[in-house]
Amino acid sequence: MVGAILVLSGAGLSAESGLKTFRAEDGLWENYRVEDVATPEAFARDPALVQRFYNERRADVAVARPNPAHEALARLQQAHGESVHLVTQNIDDLLERGGARDVFHMHGEVNSALCAACGHRWPAPDVMEAGHPCPACGAPAARPDIVWFGEMPYHMDRIQAALEASDLFVALGTSGTVYPAAGFRQMAQQLGIRTMEINLDASGALFDEVREGPASTVVPEWVSEVLNG
Ligand code: NAD
Ligand code: ZN
């Protein structure tokens, strides 16, 4: 019998869909330094630059397609409903477009806009501009609905509850360097939950099981085992 599973995914899940991972070897993410584009300080200093960066990410996501790993996770969820929780650090919507639902986007979503003044959320236009007015309160405070470094990730209470109720924790395509997501493995182990890593190159962290390889082949194989075993 399959128990409850929580899958935490990172940029490696979407790499084969053409979206670059975050920690490239030269320390650049799509030619930008993270501290110039993914912090509240950066947005205060140069909102136009930050909007441009996320406009580019939104355009990349729009032309990307879900890969077999996204689709396999959706199949797993459809087969096991409430007992499978999909938590992602990714800001793309490829899990949803692969058929998944109720995905916890702990770092926000590039297709969502947020008013920094009133907290209203709305679908982001293709091109957001600095000073764009909020449709609810009119404040010129539209920002990408992204959790930046130094901000509190979304849905932490629900993620914590889902993790506590899990029998298996899977870290998929994530380097395990960005907290608090990076702490989930240890938290799971302290709770006596089995842990598994799926990664192109193992992170070196101590998981109970490690499966190395590209997500697009390893995830469908693992999901078939779960569904047929
Ligand atoms: P990361 O770049 O730090 O790590 C990526 C991991 O994926 C690495 O461990 C790498 O070995 C692995 N990987 C690369 N290609 C893979 C493949 N084909 N199959 C399996 N694994 C593969 O990414 P992270 O841990 O997610 O870092 C967190 C931050 O990056 C998050 O804040 C996230 O929002 C941001 N980010 C998101 C996207 C996206 O939404 N698609 C893209 C880039 C970065
Ligand atoms: Zn507002």
Image (cartoon, rainbow, N blue to C red):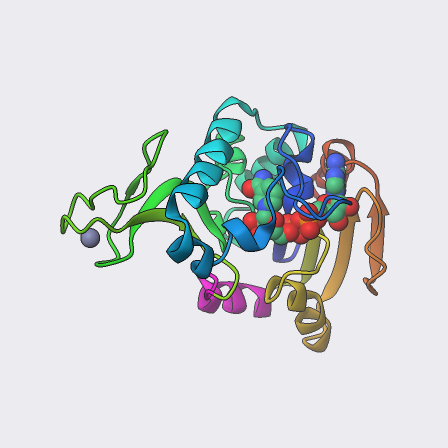
Residue 89 appears in the rendering: no
What's the residue at 38%, 48% (across, down)? 47
Q: Image check: 29 left or right of 52?
A: right
As rendered, which of 130 and 156 lies closer to the eye?
A: 130
Residue 150 appears in the rendering: yes
What's the residue at 49%, 32% (across, down)? 56
The C terminus, quarter of image: top right
On whether residue 170 falls in the magenta region, the answer is: no
What's the residue at 36%, 29% (across, down)? 126
As rendered, which of 186 and 167 lies closer to the eye?
A: 186
Is 24 located above or below residue 196 in the figure?
Answer: above
Q: Quadrant of residue 11?
A: top right
- Ligand 1 in which quarter: top right
Residue 80: image location, x then y, percent: 56, 46
**Prevailing SS of the magenta stretch:** helix
Q: Quadrant of residue 6?
A: bottom right
As rendered, which of 215 and 99 lies closer to the eye?
A: 215
Q: Image check: 227 left or right of 108?
A: right
Magenta range: 151-165
Hey, which residue is sitting farthest left in the picture?
137
Q: Image check: 140 left or right of 17?
A: left
Q: Image check: 104 left or right of 168?
A: left
Residue 115: image location, x then y, percent: 27, 52
What's the residue at 51%, 38% (across, down)? 92
Residue 1: image location, x then y, percent: 69, 53
Residue 46: image location, x then y, percent: 41, 49
Is 61 located above or below residue 153 in the figure?
Answer: above
